[in-house]
Image (tube, helix red, strand yellow):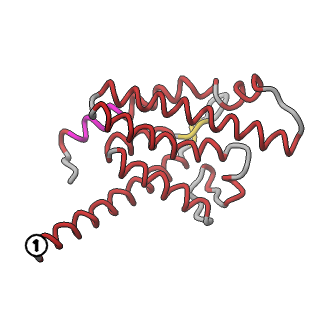
Amino acid sequence: MNKTKETKKRFKTIDLAYIAIGAVLITICSWISIPTTVPFTMQTFAVFFVLSFLGGKRGTIAIIVYVLLGAVGVPVFSHFTSGIGILLGNTGGYMVGFILMGAIYSIVVHLFGKKTWSEILAMVIGLAVCYSFGTVWFLIVYTQANGAVSLTAVLAWCVIPFIIPDIIKLGMALTLSRRLSTVMKLQ
């Protein structure tokens, strides 16, 4: 009986450790900014990687921990920012959308198994939902603060420049996750 309790406790401790590492990885990658015409961070790469490597449940919880840390003031967001004001700001919907991405990943992989095609499908659908949720959020917040803005303008600012980099990050995250999975077996 004690061994069963010990095994369950260790499993929970391992889960917590993996979740913490996932949240830290997302944080570090959000601080990495790639200077291009429209600068982007490696945050989405980390979200894809954490979901693929840790699995849907652990990965989604790691994303939630990351967002909550930022909400309470730990400077985990890009440019070392934090606070509920960032989450409630123009682009906060995209970060909240990461949680939706995790939920979609979990559901799709649960339904179809953890196969490359199902992971890609889950991440592409999740990314589309994240873009959609974030764009609607941006439209509402921006319009309240600055007046009306067109959907075309918001898509040009917040989505279109990021599609190709995000697809590249998705491919890199899946490749790295697959390679690490062959040498590291998660418990």
Magenta portion: prevailing SS class: helix
Q: Is residue 27 left or right of residue 155?
A: left
Q: Please tell me how crowded label 1 is: few (under 14), some (14-19), or many (20+) other residues with Cα within 10 Å.
A: few
Q: Is residue 15 above or below residue 159?
A: below
Which residue is situated farthest in the right direction here?
147
Q: Is residue 120 left or right of residue 36?
A: left
Q: Check residue 36 for magenta coloring.
A: no
Query: What x and y, as percent, mark residue 2?
Result: 12, 77
Badge 1 amino acid: Lys
Q: Check residue 178 for magenta coloring.
A: yes
Residue with the mark numbered 1: 3
Query: What x and y, as percent, mark residue 10?
Result: 22, 67
Identity of the residue drawn at 27% across and 62% down: 14
Q: Is residue 78 above or below residue 2?
A: above
Front residue of this view, candidates 49 and 100: 100
**Which quarter of the image is occupied by the N terminus?**
bottom left
Residue stretch in magenta: 174-181
Q: Is residue 148 above or below residue 18?
A: above
Identity of the residue drawn at 63% across and 51% down: 79
Identity of the residue drawn at 45% across and 43% down: 103
Dot 1 falls on a residue whose secondary structure is: helix
Query: What x and y, as percent, mark residue 151?
Result: 76, 26
Front residue of this view, candidates 95 and 29: 95
Q: Is residue 110 above or below residue 10?
A: above
Front residue of this view, candidates 32 and 75: 75
**Which quarter of the image is occupied by the C terminus?**
bottom left
